Amino acid sequence: MLYTDELDYELPPELIARYPSQPRDRSRLLVYHRGADSVDHRFFSDLPELLNPGDLLIANDTRVIPAKLSLFKATGGMVTGLFIAELLPGTWRVMLRTRGRATPGLQLQTLSAKTSEPLVMKLVERASEKGQWIVTVNDPRPAVEVLADIGEVPLPPYIIQARELNAPSTTFNQISECGSGSLEEIGADQDSTVNLSVAAANANIRDAESYQTIYAREAGALAAPTAGLHFTPEVFARLAERQINHAWVTLHVGLGTFLPVTTPIVDQHPMHLESYRIPCATVQRIRQQRAAGGRMVLVGTTTVRTLETMASSLVDLSVPAQDLSGATNLLIQPGYHFQLTDALITNFHLPRSTLLALVGALTGLDRLKSIYRQAIQHRYRFYSFGDAMMILS
């Protein structure tokens, strides 16, 4: 039994990465060798030389959708929102944050430079999840198309908070904050409003590019599979030179990735369902790799959860090779027996998170905590835009 407080650790706030490394592969890479129980300190650009010819790298090619919404009441008051799911054409489930009380029938709208008419969103009823609503929108197109016109890529809240703590301008802080008031409420003058609006727009563009892997293809995630953010075309080219192959899975990261474990025992945590797909080509690659006795290097906890969910079908040769799809709420914690995870590339995760429990299941939780202490001593950057670690067998 794993108690949630066993997933606690102390992190100096200045080690929370506010922006990604430039270039991406210049991020640092802590390498833990399980067999030797030793740690190396490298850079992510060293990855190809740390792997063996014949290794198979498997990564999650989900693409983050611009799910963050800036909405306005008829009175001009601002409401921030997050798209959660499309229930029917024109009917969505969203999370809303407003200063006033929201009631059924309330109409909100948003206007983008990409559209000539505002999107009108009408609140129908509260959803069962706290803060979420069932709404209708006046655009029958698929939600992914609508969001491409009106939405922004949602960064994890801790990145926004870390930036605010270090931002030089209080006014810019307030504009950037999720759920902040309008410029009129803040009291900015006209010139500074224009400058700050331009700065915020440019920042949104940069974030939309940075918070996306270079191989993201399948739109549907609310958060990035952040272990993949370190890859560059140059890294992939050198992997190919060393005859290290790669394959893809898709798992659309959901809202649950932001949620800490709040139950006293980790087993009691309600895991959110996340949809996945394993293409037939990947199924075949995995079977060939296993038959040859080769190593599989998984990029990110989302890839681990996808493959471990379907491990029995993936290794059972009596099951025809085909696309595999479904939804998973698999919780991996210490004591779990991994079937397809030989090595793992991952980021440094938040305390009290199921992601930390997953990595602890691979290394041993006590050993993982000592590795994290080393990372803190060596001033590694943590969380989504931070540095990486790799666990090798």
Image (cartoon, grey):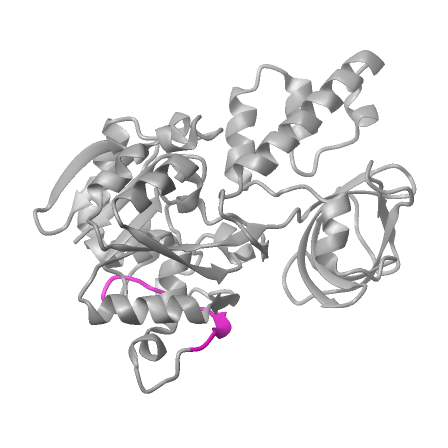
Q: Quadrant of the N terminus?
A: bottom left
**Looking at the image, is 43 positioned above or below residue 298?**
above
**Looking at the image, is 3 positioned above or below residue 197?**
below
Residue drawn at point x = 27 percent, y = 61 percent:
341
Image location (x, y in percent) of residue 225: 46, 49
Tell whether position 305 is magenta: no
Q: Quadrant of the C terminus?
A: bottom left
Marks counted in the figure total 0
Image location (x, y in percent) of residue 243: 26, 49
Q: Left of 318 or right of it: where is 370?
A: left
Residue furthest out toward the left: 36
Majority secondary structure of magenta residues: loop
> Which residue is at the front of the view, 48 or 274?
48
> Which residue is at the front of the view, 188 or 233?
233
Residue furthest out toward the bottom: 318
Residue drawn at point x = 91 percent, y = 45 percent:
117
Is any atom of residue 79 visible in this view? yes
Task: State which region is magenta.
Answer: 322-336
Tell whether position 329 is magenta: yes
Is any atom of residue 133 visible in this view? no
> Which residue is at the front of the view, 227 or 157?
227
Image location (x, y in percent) of residue 155: 57, 40
